[in-house]
Amino acid sequence: MDRRRNARRSQLNGAHTAESWNSAHPVGTRVRYWPVYPPVESVAPFDTTTRSEAWALGDGSVVVSVVGRTGGVCLSHIELLETKGEHT
């Protein structure tokens, strides 16, 4: 399958769009970034914060900038972290 079809399938299956991510998660949201996904033992994730709003790439993938990385990282590599006083 091509990337556009995969991206569209993800959107239809409940994945975030840039607009839905931005409305729910402001710049500065605490996240865990997984450089390799699915995770592998030899590559550890790191905790960081978002430094931009999310945006969609030409193939439909949704990315966001995080502190400590250049460019956008795909939302599939991001895990939300609990903030103080917040319970999931």
Image: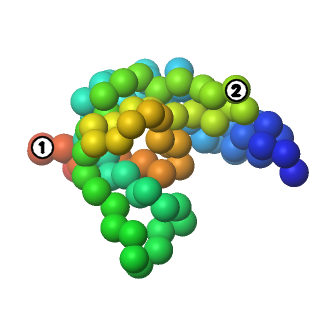
Q: Secondary structure at mark 2?
A: loop
Q: How would you rate the neighbour count of disc 2 (Cα within 10 Å): few for under 14, some for 14-19, many for 20 or more?
A: few
Compared across the picture, whether 17 is left or right of 65 comes to right
Amino acid type shown at disc 2: Gly
Compared across the picture, whether 8 is left or right of 52 comes to right
Residue projecting furthest to the front: 70
Residue projecting furthest to the left: 84
Residue bearing the label numbered 1 = 85
Could you tell me which residue is drawn at 32 percent across and 52 percent down? 32
Is residue 12 something one can see in this rendering? no
**Residue 79 screen position, x and y as percent:** 39, 51
Q: Earlier in the sequence, mark 1 or mark 2?
A: 2
Question: Residue 52, located in which quarter of the rendered image?
Answer: top left
Compared across the picture, whether 55 is left or right of 61 comes to left
Amino acid type shown at disc 1: Gly
Which label sits on residue 4? none
Could you tell me which residue is drawn at 72 percent across and 32 percent down? 59
Compared across the picture, whether 75 is left or right of 51 comes to right
Residue bearing the label numbered 2 = 58
Q: Is residue 74 above or below residue 55?
A: below
